[in-house]
Image: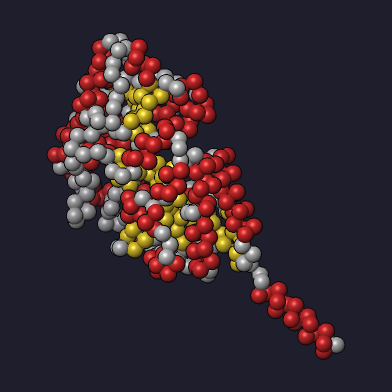
């Protein structure tokens, strides 16, 4: 009887020593291609790791609110998506685990990632996330429309005034909607930087009332109001910029690789008519960088195991995701293997792009973004002047970025 008890105890001890640690990873549900990609990544990791098993648990609905509720309640996932737009808010909330020591300990090749994508997730000199992929903005144009009206194609060397000139030629020669623009502040940001402007000052107060930013705001607005060359997608009867371009309601839009994917999937006949070049410039080249990182929960009970999973997600996993979902790889070695010629401009633009992140005293920019979008809508509709818009920003910005 005693021998039997010892045997049972040994079996239990051996079994427990080989029980796998479960690492929960969380993001928002993607499209079918993205969901297929992440599930394949999880399956591949689990099949090659007996001691660690990964569980994908996406959050539907209000992702940030649900995530923060779980994190503050001690029920958060081990790894999760962090959009660069809200990164600083989460970093200031002290819910993210710094990764520098893990990177140094394992000799993880952080230099393989585009520098701008590494910098996007640094706060107070610490890395709090590693970009899983990214997007940038470029200028889409319809070659057939430009050919029909005898107007030279946009080029990578164009300035914003070249764009204005070519759009004017299209209009003068009978094409009604040369350009479609969104009344979204993030689409104005590349123009501000291109004019040599900045978003905030050293003390984190707004720089949107400085002359460079005002000049950018004026040009962006007057493409709609004064020159009547640009229209909101809704004015053209489209749901969004990519929809307007794919349905050939406009000759040009500023958009990202998601529009290329949309064209290929839903309007394949338009792909052969599509040209894509870098955004126009003035003082310097500029683009927007939209990126999402994998970050680690500071309260995770299994940080070493979570780090092993994170490494896999942004190395082998990234290769799978780029192939399956058509996203842009954040690692330069992965980008070098992406031979799609129409995606090259988006990769090139990361070198001079700016992450969609506006530093504020609280780390919160959402309220300010809503007000700035509202101001752009009012400008496009002619309800306010540039001067009134600038005065409103100067008067109210501080209250927009404080809790």
Name the residue at 33% across, 58% down: 122
> Residue 199 at what x, y percent from top left?
23, 46
Name the residue at 39% across, 52% down: 113
Q: Is 363 placed left or right of 162 in the picture?
A: right
Name the residue at 32% across, 23% down: 179
Q: Is residue 281 visible?
A: yes
Q: Is 70 placed left or right of 125 in the picture?
A: right
236 vs 260: above or below: above
* Count of numbered labels shown in the rendering: 0
Name the residue at 38% across, 44% down: 290
Q: Is residue 235 visible?
A: no
Between 243 and 288, the one nearer to me in the picture: 288
Where on the picture, by quarter, is residue 143?
A: top left
Q: Quadrant location of the N terminus?
A: bottom right
Between 183 and 121, the one nearer to me in the picture: 121
204 vs 222: above or below: below
Q: Quadrant location of the C terminus?
A: bottom left
Residue farthest toward the right in the current orientation of the protein? 1
> Residue 311 at what x, y percent from top left?
49, 59
Residue farthest toward the left in the current orientation of the protein? 211
- Rendered image coloring scheme: secondary structure
Residue farthest toward the bottom in the current orientation of the protein? 2
> Residue 363 at what x, y percent from top left?
32, 55
> Residue 212 at what x, y percent from top left?
16, 39
Where on the picture, by quarter, is residue 21?
A: bottom right
313 vs 251: above or below: below
């Amino acid at each position: 009887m005693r021998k039997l008890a010892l045997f049972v105890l040994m079996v239990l001890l051996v079994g427990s020593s080989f029980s796998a640690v479960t690492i929960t990873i969380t993001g928002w549900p993607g499209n079918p291609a993205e969901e297929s990609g992440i599930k394949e990544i999880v399956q591949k990791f689990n099949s090659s790791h007996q001691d660690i098993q990964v569980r994908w648990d996406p959050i539907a609905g209000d992702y940030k609110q649900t995530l923060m509720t779980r994190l503050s309640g001690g029920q958060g996932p081990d790894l999760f998506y962090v959009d660069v737009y809200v990164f600083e808010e989460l970093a200031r909330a002290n819910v993210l685990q710094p990764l520098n020591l893990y990177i140094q300990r394992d000799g993880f090749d952080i230099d393989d990632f585009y520098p701008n994508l590494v910098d996007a997730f640094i706060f107070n000199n610490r890395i709090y996330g590693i970009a899983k992929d990214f997007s940038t903005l470029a200028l889409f144009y319809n070659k057939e429309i430009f050919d029909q009206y005898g107007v030279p194609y946009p080029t990578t060397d164009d300035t914003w005034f070249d764009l204005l000139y070519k759009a004017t030629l299209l209009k003068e020669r009978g094409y009604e909607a040369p350009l479609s623009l969104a009344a979204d502040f993030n689409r104005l940001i590349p123009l501000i930087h291109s004019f040599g402007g900045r978003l905030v000052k050293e003390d984190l107060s707004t720089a949107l009332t400085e002359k460079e930013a005002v000049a950018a705001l004026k040009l962006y607005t007057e493409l709609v109001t004064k020159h009547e060359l640009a229209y909101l997608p809704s004015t053209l009867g489209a749901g969004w910029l990519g929809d307007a371009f794919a349905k050939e309601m406009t000759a040009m839009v500023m958009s990202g690789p998601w529009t290329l994917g949309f064209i290929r999937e839903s309007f394949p006949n338009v792909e052969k008519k599509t040209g894509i070049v870098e955004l126009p410039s003035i003082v310097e080249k500029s683009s927007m960088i939209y990126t999402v990182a994998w970050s680690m929960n500071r309260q995770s009970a299994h940080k070493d195991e979570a780090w092993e999973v994170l490494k896999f997600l942004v190395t082998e996993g990234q290769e799978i995701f780029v192939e399956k979902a058509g996203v842009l790889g954040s690692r330069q070695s992965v980008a070098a293997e992406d031979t799609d010629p129409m995606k090259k401009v988006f990769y090139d633009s990361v070198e001079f792009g700016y992450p969609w992140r506006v530093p504020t005293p609280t780390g919160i920019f959402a309220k300010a973004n809503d007000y700035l979008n509202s101001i752009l809508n009012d400008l496009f509709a002619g309800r306010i002047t540039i001067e009134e818009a600038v005065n409103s920003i100067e008067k109210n910005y501080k209250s927009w970025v404080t809790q």
